Amino acid sequence: MRDHAADARVFKAFCDENRLQILEMLRGGEKCACILLENLQISQSTLSHHMKILCDSGIVVSRKEGKWTYYSISEEGSLMAAELLQVLTNSNHDMVNNVCSCHEK
Amino acid sequence: MRDHAADARVFKAFCDENRLQILEMLRGGEKCACILLENLQISQSTLSHHMKILCDSGIVVSRKEGKWTYYSISEEGSLMAAELLQVLTNSNHDMVNNVCSCHEK
DNA sequence: AAAACATATTGACTTTTTTCGATTTGATGA
DNA sequence: TCATCAAATCGAAAAAAGTCAATATGTTTT
């Protein structure tokens, strides 16, 4: 039995346009929050909120260095998401009763 | 340049617990709406709403047969989602300036 | 043609998410 | 120590998503 809330949390990372834009920036490598903020039309508190969601999903990891926080895409988290997507969409063709028979003649 | 709204639409399929439960049922093979409805604690109009989002994402396809509609997981849509996820999380390690240098000494 | 049925659409309401400004926390530098 | 800066948290407002009952649409059956 799967934990739907936990599964949903992973994909929330990709369901908001600002977060997709953040990921786009992180694809170029690790960035600190201030650089991300500079390139987005959102407030500091909103960025912090999105970074929390991205980190909670496991797709992004953060690293503190002094007063700065650096963010990057987690290879491990990305791999887990890919595997999860596989599970969620892999329809089991070996199963008996694979086709709905609720209205057969 | 990516279309963030379109990319987000794909992953919306996996961001709601009812939709994850629907996908879980469809993993066992094609199902008609009435069977899905029987196994969910939601109204008919809410199911219809979720099926629209699932179809819009490309993860699910529908097939009409008389007055019934049958839904199933789209292999093609699932593959596209997997490829998209790859793109969105593939940080480009070949790039120059891969590490944020905004606060170097 | 009318009744019955399955699904989609509409409109209103509720819940969740996003957003911001203000404040707090925690680290650095003067 | 005190001022400064980066990021997180809080509380409120706005926007978006989920929900349902009622109704509409389209198909089948009588």
Image (cartoon, coloured by chain):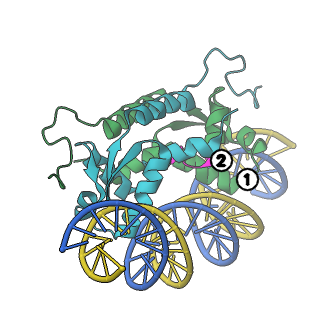
Chain colours: A green, B cyan, C yellow, D blue
Disc 2 + disc 1, Cβ < 8 Å: yes
Would residue B86 be found to the left or right of residue B68 on screen? right
The residue mark sitting in front, 2 or 1, is: 2
Would residue A33 be found to the left or right of residue A41 on screen? left
Residue A69 visible in image: no
Q: Measured from the top left, where is residue A47 in percent x and y?
A: 66, 50
Q: Chain of mark 1?
A: A
Is A15 within the magenta? yes
* Residue A5 sits in quarter: bottom left
Residue shown at the point (50%, 43%) measured from the top left? B10
Tell me the element at label 1: loop
Q: Amino acid at mark 2?
A: Asn
Residue shown at the point (63%, 29%) measured from the top left? A30
* Residue B72 sits in quarter: top left
- The magenta stretch is A12-19
Residue carrying label 2: A18
Using the image as rendered, state which of residue A55 and residue A105 is in the foreground: A105
Q: Earlier in the sequence, mark 2 or mark 1?
A: 2
Q: Measured from the top left, where is residue D19 in percent x and y?
A: 40, 71
* Residue C20 sits in quarter: bottom right
Would residue C13 be found to the left or right of residue B95 on screen? left
Q: Are marks 2 and 1 on the same chain?
A: yes
Residue shown at the point (22%, 33%) measured from the top left? A93
Residue carrying label 1: A42
Residue A63 visible in image: yes
Q: Measured from the top left, where is residue B81 in percent x and y?
A: 47, 35
| Residue neighbourhood size for the residue with mark 2, other residues' Cα within 10 Å, grouped as few (<14), some (14–19), many (≥20) | some
